[in-house]
Amino acid sequence: MGVLNVTPDSFSDGGRYTDVDAAVQHGVGLFQEGAHVIDVGGESTRPGAERVDAATEIARVVPVIERLFAQGVPVSIDTTRAAVAEAALAAGAVVINDVSGGLADPGMAAVAAAAGCPWILMHWRGHSRDMQRLAVYHDVVAEVRDELRERADAAIAAGVDPGLIVLDPGLGFAKLPEHNWALSAHLDALVGLGFPVLFAASRKTYLGRLLAGPDGMPRPVDGREAATLATSLLAVASGAWGVRVHQVGATADALAVWRATGSPRFRGTP
């Protein structure tokens, strides 16, 4: 899954693709590099980010999705709002990637059920402004597993096909670095729930902190690609269905090499 943020304030590439032509060109490029789906988002979910209204979000994503769809590029919509998801699906999106796991908007389940499209449910405890104060766990792996199971059960009860549910541990969302590392090390506990698992560590702050220089300053965003690649390969080796990354080409190449080893753990093309 290739990341395409059409926002002015995303943590990694905010402002680079607010122009529709630039966004479409980048999305097509990610697809050509090997992404199976391009994840288009119109609202930043970085820690501390302020919300935009649904109309702004729709205005940002729909023109980009329409043009990507016209060029045969599969698109997922990264949103927590049912109205935005509906507009994106009408424009050609084929997947809903909901970082709130359906909690932010009670109407999202009905949209997903009616559309009959894959719905990615991420582990979530609150909006960006407040989420880091909610990063309190006794056993982060068990609690995230159980909370994701609850979200999947709620989706199924709302009429969503169980075969279309994908789970995401939500690295960095109400998680401290030690929580992210624990979830990465025990991803098999989430895979064991029986749903495909999406892993999304790309360029996140905890990688920058791991790679901090002698002065203690976190590695800048553009210096986290090797670490992102390592986390992605380890996730696939642990049974992840897919990885969400900003830099697709290197990830596709690495997965091709890994695939060529014939590893019995490989689960196929996301």
Image (cartoon, rainbow, N blue to C red):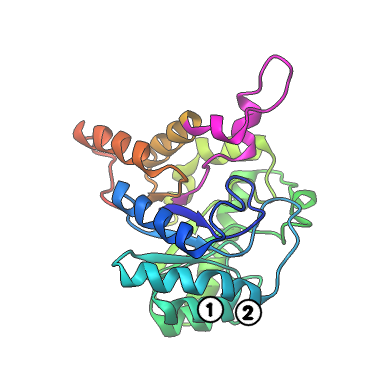
Kindly indicate the quadrant of the structure image that contains residue 160.
bottom left
Do labels 1 and 2 touch, CB within 8 Å? yes
Note whether residue 195 is visible. no
Q: Which residues are magenta?
A: 196-225
Residue 167 position in % (x across, y down): 48, 58
Q: Residues within 10 Å of mark 1 (few under 14, many from 20)?
A: many
For the residue pair 190 and 209, the one nearer the viewer reads as 209
> Which residue is found at the position 47% from the left and 59% from the top?
23
Which disc number belongs to residue 232? none
Mark 1, residue position: 109
> Which residue is found at the position 61% from the left and 59% from the top?
7
Kind of residue sitting beneath label 2: Pro
Note whether residue 58 is visible. yes
Q: Is residue 146 above or below residue 221?
A: below
Q: Identify the secondary structure beneath mark 1.
A: helix
Kindly indicate the quadrant of the structure image that contains residue 108.
bottom right
Kind of residue sitting beneath label 1: Ala
Mark 2, residue position: 106
Query: Which secondary structure dominates the residues rendered in magenta?
Result: loop
How far separated are the C-alphas under marks 1 and 2? 7 Å
Q: Residues within 10 Å of mark 2 (few under 14, many from 20)?
A: few
> Which residue is found at the position 48% from the left and 50% from the top?
190
Q: Is residue 105 above or below residue 138?
A: below
Check if residue 136 falls in the magenta segment. no
Residue 200 position in % (x across, y down): 50, 47
Check if residue 203 falls in the magenta segment. yes
Residue 211 position in % (x across, y down): 60, 24
71 left or right, relative to 146: left
